[in-house]
Amino acid sequence: MVFEKVAAMLAEKLECEVSEIKMDTKFETLGIDSLDVMELLMNVEEEFGTEIELGENKVNAVGDLVALIESKLQ
């Protein structure tokens, strides 16, 4: 569920097909910079009703973000 929502958000932002986004897709490959990741995090926080702090967590790929969100939702 988390991956599907994140992939849909990314696909909308990037104007691409959801099927192009995989768990191991790196943000760099998608042309997303750190500011875009922060914007995505704010949207994710709103969508999932949780606060996400990156801290020392490295969020380089879609799977990293999904794992971070899932850890906050438990």
Image: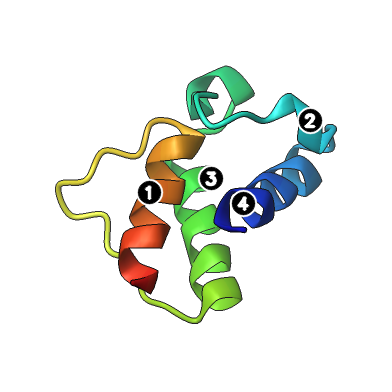
The mark nearer the N terminus, 3 or 4, is 4
Distance from Cα at disc 4 to Cα at disc 1: 11 Å
Q: CA distance from mark 3 to mark 1?
A: 18 Å
Residue visible at 45% across and 53% down in the picture: 38
- Going 75% across and 37% down the picture, which residue do you hit? 14
Q: Secondary structure at mark 2?
A: helix
Q: Quadrant of residue 63?
A: top left
Judge by depth and name the residue closer to the eye, 51 or 73.
73
Q: Residues within 10 Å of mark 1 (few under 14, many from 20)?
A: some
The secondary structure type at the circle numbered 3 is helix
Task: In this rendered view, identify the residue nearer to me: 3 or 17.
Answer: 3
For marks 4 and 1 on the same chain, the one whose residue lies earlier in the sequence: 4
Residue 19, numbered circle: 2
Residue 6, numbered circle: 4
Q: Quadrant of the C terminus?
A: bottom left
Where is residue 3? Give x, y as percent. Answer: 59, 48
The span from disc 3 to disc 4 (Cα, nearest Å) is 13 Å
4 and 2 marks in contact (CB < 8 Å): no
Task: Say what secondary structure mark 1 lies in.
Answer: helix
Question: Gap between marks 4 and 2, in whole Å?
Answer: 12 Å
Residue 52 visible in the displayed image: no
Judged left or right of residue 45, residue 22 is right
Mark 4 or 1, closer to the camera: 1
Q: Which disc number belongs to residue 36?
A: 3
- Identify the residue under disc 1: 67
Q: Nearer the viewer, residue 27 or 67?
A: 67
